[in-house]
Image: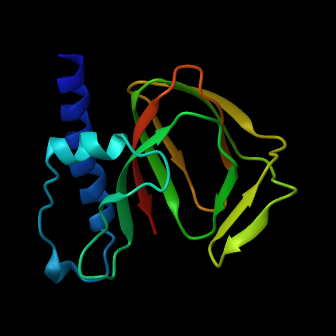
Amino acid sequence: MKKLNRILIGIVFLVIAGGLAHNHAQDKSSASPVYVEHQKVEASYKHSLPIPDLFAGQSGNANYRVRASRHDDPTEVEIHTLDTDIFYVTTGTATFVAGGTAPDAKQISPTELRGKTINGATTYNLSQGDVMVVPRGIPHQFQAIPSAPFLYMEVKVR
């Protein structure tokens, strides 16, 4: 029953977040519903990194991506210069920090920075059912994963 609830909540989140992100799409004339079968969602949770997209918008000009994400260990500090992250936690707990500065952040691509340390951030204890929204430009990091695996649905909106 718990697994079924997680799947249903994940699908509802996909539909809601995908619909919200799609409302910002440049070309609304090509809008169509997106359905992702629960088997594909569950299979995506088995991956650690790289994380495969469940859906990445329409016709190559996507302004959002949807992923089933998993962390077993802490992550590096991330800063996305163009993307806002929206997380919906489905399983596990994590200590997440966001805000402040990342003094050692280095550019790894034109729109992404990574670092090892984050200063002056706010700490959040994430657990099943929580939603976290991290606007673009905000340093963030999963600092501890006490109950691995930590699973969440992720929507990146550009």
Question: Image height check: is 153 above or below 89?
Answer: below
Question: Image height check: is 15 above or below 109?
Answer: above
Identify which residue, 122 or 50, lies in the foreground: 50
Q: Give the residue at x 78% y 47%.
A: 100
In this rendering, does residue 138 appear at all?
no
Which quarter of the rendered picture does the N terminus lie within? top left
Question: Image height check: is 89 above or below 19?
Answer: above
Identify which residue, 49 or 63, lies in the foreground: 49
Residue 75, x across and y down, in percent: 65, 43
Q: Judge from the rendering whether residue 76 lies leftward or rightward of residue 39; answer left or right.
A: right
Q: Give the residue at x 61% y 35%.
A: 73
Q: Judge from the rendering whether residue 103 lies leftward or rightward of residue 107; answer left or right.
A: right
Residue 17, x across and y down, in percent: 31, 52
Q: Judge from the rendering whether residue 72 lies leftward or rightward of residue 31; answer left or right.
A: right
Residue 50, x across and y down, in percent: 48, 56
Q: In which quarter of the image is residue 88?
A: top left
Q: Give the residue at x 34% y 75%.
A: 62
Q: Give the residue at x 70% y 65%.
A: 113
In this rendering, does residue 150 appear at all?
yes
